Image (cartoon, rainbow, N blue to C red):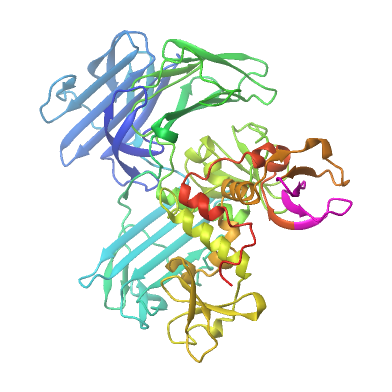
Amino acid sequence: MLWKNSRRSCTTKLTTAVAYACETVEARVVLSGSSQLAAVLTGVTAGFGEAEYRDDNGDRRLELRVYNATPGSYDVTVGGQVVAQISVNTKRVGRLEMRDSSGGGNRLPFPPNWPAVSVGTSVQIGNLYSGNLVVEGEDSRIEENATVRLVGAKGEYLESEYEAEQEDGNVTVRRFELHVRNLTPSQQFAFQINEQTVQSITTDALGNANLQYSDRTRPGFTAFPAGFPAITDGTQFSIGTVFSGAYATAPVTQAPITDGGDHLHLNLFGTGTMKGQAVYEAVPGVGGAVRREFKVELWNGTPGASVPVNVGDQQVGTILINSKGYGKLAFEDGSVQKPFPANWPGASVDTIVTAGNALTGAFTGVGQTLSPLEDNAREAYELDQTLGLQALTTMYENWGGRGEKWLQGKGSSWYFITPDGTLYRWDGKAGANGQRIAVLDDSLHASPELLHEAEAPDVIGTDDRLVRAEATELDRELNLTSAAPSTTNWGGLAEKWFRGNAQKWYFMTPDGTLTRWDGSGKAKGTVVGNLDERFHERPELLTEAETHLTETEKAFAADRGLELSAVRNEFNNWGGENEKWVKSASQWYIVKQDGGLFKWDGRRGASGTRITTLAKRYYDDTSLLVNAASAGDMEVEAALDDVYVDLPDYL
């Protein structure tokens, strides 16, 4: 809800698909003081309440919302004092606002007996629901999160973030990033924290420089230098004489990353051991038609129990709890197996979702984004690339009794993500146990594909997917490898060099332009690709480009480029390797158990040329490959068409 994922100030349009125009504040930043407090109010019945209290320089504001309560009037008690009454209407929803400034409707003035409010102050709605106020957005997994962003008088730019989080065993894991732009090119600057020089940085030919440290293995990061100081609210820093200032833990305003439409995620509250969540998405599809998905998941329920699911006053389905205490109900437009029921009532503001008599939630219009914020998306992408995460046919939900979902990584490593968004590396013992390796948000548990098919943050919602596809095509055709660091700037353009097929040389300038060298004594030649500056900063984005495609993109590229047309299950295991067979109009292809896709060489057995490696689900169900999902953009799809086709575009 609003105090767990993100805080949103919204204007809400009451339609069957809730529309938002919102400002979102990253909730991973711990707020200081007690001026912004919130609580979830729960009780003995399948309903819940929300309380939020602010004190902005003496302008106090209390907001209360109650859902799925018996209609009537109830006392509101704060800190042991009855301060007002709240009315619950026939739709089982109640609202109350108290504020020092004037207003109408349900807004009331603060009474004379208003108590002192701080962290831990109790809030109670009659004898229904109660809870204690905590710092809004507080996440006990985050020890420190401090940021700074500055712009200089001549357009110089600095952005830096320090984060420390607590992992299992009380181990603190840190991450630090510093990015400067538009400083004097090719010059050295001292980076100091509290007047202690941490490291000298040298700008490139464009005046840019980066420092990235992490205690955990991450792409593009190095280990922290010895003696790196802790950074907290108010820690002073400087970059030469260009920048000086202080880090702060004030929240950062960001928009959630989406491709448009509604992406809603709500937790279901209750009094027993069973927990749950609901997801509703309504996004524009082909021709402007809205494509809807709805899902309710329950865990730690009674095995074998049937739990009715209501949306509003309509029962829309039943969830059967399996032997692990997990169950799911899902609807999807266009799906024969999961069609929306004829009595689907739609989802609008204040629509209440219930699961049996134990759990309930509501579409409140605030703080329910399913789409991760930028920081979470960046973290998910780095983890996916580092760990090689992939989903299996089943995610073994709640196998360890923590409502967790399971993913497989490189080698024999297993990972699981709990409902609060924490990612663990499994220790191999019975139950959901292991080392906590990342603090994410709970949208990634609700939709694990945001993790195991994570896109780079600059990719989501932009045409950067096209750049990745073009980079993959370049790398596969030219077979690029990074040259020795000593070759950098050989031609005086701050360029980086690569070797390719037939011992040809290529170089990339800081703007991302890739050129085939003409063999002269200068950095000159024929341009073969235009990417962007990130590929110059991190050449592995080009030399390992295919690993940065999502599984959906790789499957689409294989399907479309190879013109796959048929699943031929009758030939499964014909080659004796438990392989599966698919074909185009004129060529046979093999999918092996490790996800390897091969072009058959025509010999007896399952031999051939490996084209790529896909997620295991494409082996489990080869129809997912032959009928691969759209990559979402016509221009991107056109680029992906050529990725696995040997066309001499660049030679």
- Magenta highlight range: 584-609
Q: Position of residue 647 (x, y in %)?
A: 61, 63
User: Relative to 122, is 538 on the left or the right?
Assistant: right
* Nearer to me, 98 or 480: 480
Percent position (x, y) of residue 508?
48, 75
Say if 558 sits above or below 232 in the image.
above
Seen from this angle, which residue lies furthest bottom? 521
Residue 605 forms part of the magenta stretch: yes
Q: Residue 281 location in percent, x, y?
A: 44, 31
* Residue 511 appears in view: yes
Furthest residue to the left? Answer: 102
Residue 487: image quadrant is bottom right
Residue at the (77%, 48%) spot, across then down: 590
Q: Residue at x 35, y 76 (%)?
A: 207
Give the tally of numbered discs.
0
Tell me which corner region of the image, top left, top right, bottom left or bottom right, holds residue 229: bottom left
- Residue sitting at the far front: 586
Residues 493 and 109: in front is: 493
Is residue 496 in the magenta section? Answer: no
Seen from the viewer's position, the closer of residues 51 and 562 is 562
Q: Is residue 79 left or right of residue 398?
A: left
Kindly identify the residue that appears in the image at 62 percent across and 75 percent down: 500
Mark yes or no: residue 455 visible. Answer: no
Of the 4 image quadrants, the one containing the N terminus is top left
Quadrant where the image shows the C terminus: bottom right
Give coordinates of residue 289: x percent, y percent: 41, 30
Picture quarter containing residue 199?
bottom left
